[in-house]
Image (cartoon, grey):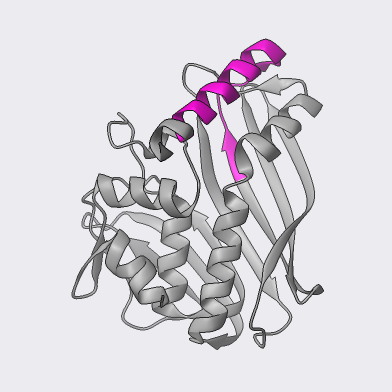
Amino acid sequence: MSIKEMFIENYCSLSADKISFTRQQGSDFAKQVADDFNPLHNIDARRFCVPGDLLFSIIIAKSGLHQQMTFNFSGMVSDNVNLTFPQEIDNHYDIKDDKDKTCLTVSVSGKSTHNPILINALTKAYVDFSGQTFPDILVKLMSENNVMINPSRPMVMYQSMSIDLHTLVADSITLKLAKTSLSINGKRGDAWLEFDLLSNDKVIGHGKKHMLLSGLRPYEQETIDAMVSQYRESKASYLA
C-alpha cells in the first residue's frame, strides 16, 4: 500500500492545497494505525484533537523526508479545520488554519527524498513506536518520578518531535527507545522520549519526542492500575 493510499486518502480530506480531518478519520487513524487509545482521539471527546502522528505522516508524504526535521505543535487541531500547506517548502514553514493561526511549525535541513519505500518504512516505524507511549513508556516514567496524570482527565499532549538521519539510503527502519526523562514544574511535566533509528540493526539516526503531561499529582499504584486497565478494556472493546 502506498503512502498516499494509506494516509492521504483514508485519513484526511484534500481540497486544492488544503487538508482537513473529520473526527472519524482522526479517530480511525489513532486506533487502527497508531494503536493509540488516548481519549482525546475518541469521536465523542469534548476536546477532540487530530493525532500528531497523523499530521507528521501527512507532512512527510506531501512535502518529502529531510535528513533533519523538527515539528513543533503550537495548538490542537480539531475536526473540520482546514490546514493550508505552503506552495513552496522552505527550510522553515508554518502550517496554518483558515484563521491564519499557526498550528504546526516545521523546520528542515539536509538532503531530502520522496522515496515512498523509505517514507513508508519511517512512518510505520514511528507510528508503531508511538503506540507504545501509553501505558508502556509513560507509566514507567511516572512511577520513577513518583507522579501521575489526573485519572479523571488524563491529558497527554504531543508538543514536538525531531529526527536526524545520517543517510536517506535505507529500505527498512525500526525505532528503539534510547532514553527517557521527565522534568516537573508544579502540576506540569515535560516528558522526553529519545530513540535510535536503525536499518538492518545499524544505527542510521536519532530522534526525540516531547510530550506535555498536565494535572500531575502524587503517584498511586492502585489508581494507575485502574487507569491502565480501563485503557486496555477500551482497546479490547474497540477490537472486539
In this view, 142 is above or below 129: above
Q: Is residue 234 magenta?
A: yes
Seen in the picture, residue 37 relative to 77 is either above or below; the reply is above
Q: Residue at x 69, y 30 (%)?
A: 139
Q: What is the chief secondary structure element of the magenta stretch?
A: helix
Looking at the picture, how far across and down is residue 29, in whole percent?
A: 39, 53
What segment is highlighted magenta in the picture?
211-235
17 sits left or right of 197 in the view = left
Q: Nearer the viewer, residue 173 or 154?
A: 173
Whether residue 50 appears in magenta in the rendering, the answer is no
- Expressed as whole percent of the image width and height from the top left, the position of residue 1 reads 41, 75
**Can you give x and y, in whole percent of width and height, for residue 104 in the image?**
43, 58
Residue 57 to residue 31: above or below? below
Identify the residue shown where x is 76% and y is 77%: 200
Name the one closer to the observer, 54 or 70. 54
Q: Position of residue 194 (x, y in %)?
A: 73, 54
Viewer-proximal residue, 150 or 214?
Answer: 150
Q: Is residue 172 above or below residue 232?
A: below
Q: Is residue 146 left or right of residue 47?
A: right
Q: Residue at x 53, y 77 (%)?
A: 119
> Can residue 93 be seen at all in this image of the molecule?
no
